[in-house]
Image (tube, rainbow, N blue to C red):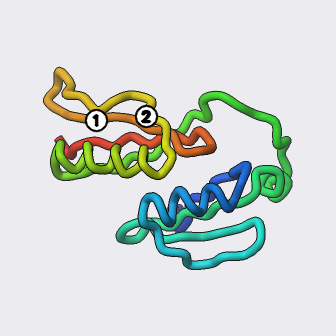
Amino acid sequence: MAVQVSVIMLGVRDVARAKKFYVEGLGGDVEQDYPGFVRCKLGDGSSLALYEWEAAAQDAGVSAEGSGFRGVSFHFITDSRDEVDEAMRTAEDAGATVVKAAAATNWGGYFGYFSDPDGYLWKVTTAG
């Protein structure tokens, strides 16, 4: 059996804040909503679970300590520069921090980065 991603789970410090960011701010649709846990649909097929940070660490059997770059970023690929700019504005309006403003690259692309309220990085980019 080949491995596939069904749901991406993020350990967050404040589930209500993360839910507001991803659902109200970025337009996700709630699939499950329990105290300390929310799962929402993002776009056409991606699901994101938001779980209390300490509970997520306990669930995995690891320490809840950790900070800084987590070695992962999420990528949202759009069809145009205008869509990149729109997504960046929407995220910032929802409470994201723009980490790297959208700009053209020397290879012809266009992208920027924002971080969600828990510091998870999102790259918004054109397809090519």
The percent position of residue 30, horizontal first and vertical second, equals: 54, 75
Report which residue position mark 2 lands on. 98
Residue 56 picture quarter: bottom right
Residue at 57% x, 61% y is: 20
Residue type indicated by callout 2: Val
Can residue 25 be seen here? The reply is yes
Tell which tag, 2 or 1, sits nearer the viewer: 2
Residue at 39% x, 46% y is: 75
The percent position of residue 74, horizontal first and vertical second, equals: 45, 46
Report which residue position mark 1 lands on. 111
Residue 15 versus residue 102 in the image, above or below: below
Residue 87 left/right relative to 97: left
For the residues marked 2 and 1, what is the alpha-carbon distance in whole angstroms?
Answer: 12 Å
Residue at 64% x, 56% y is: 17
Can residue 2 be seen here? The reply is no
Residue ranking furthest to the top: 106
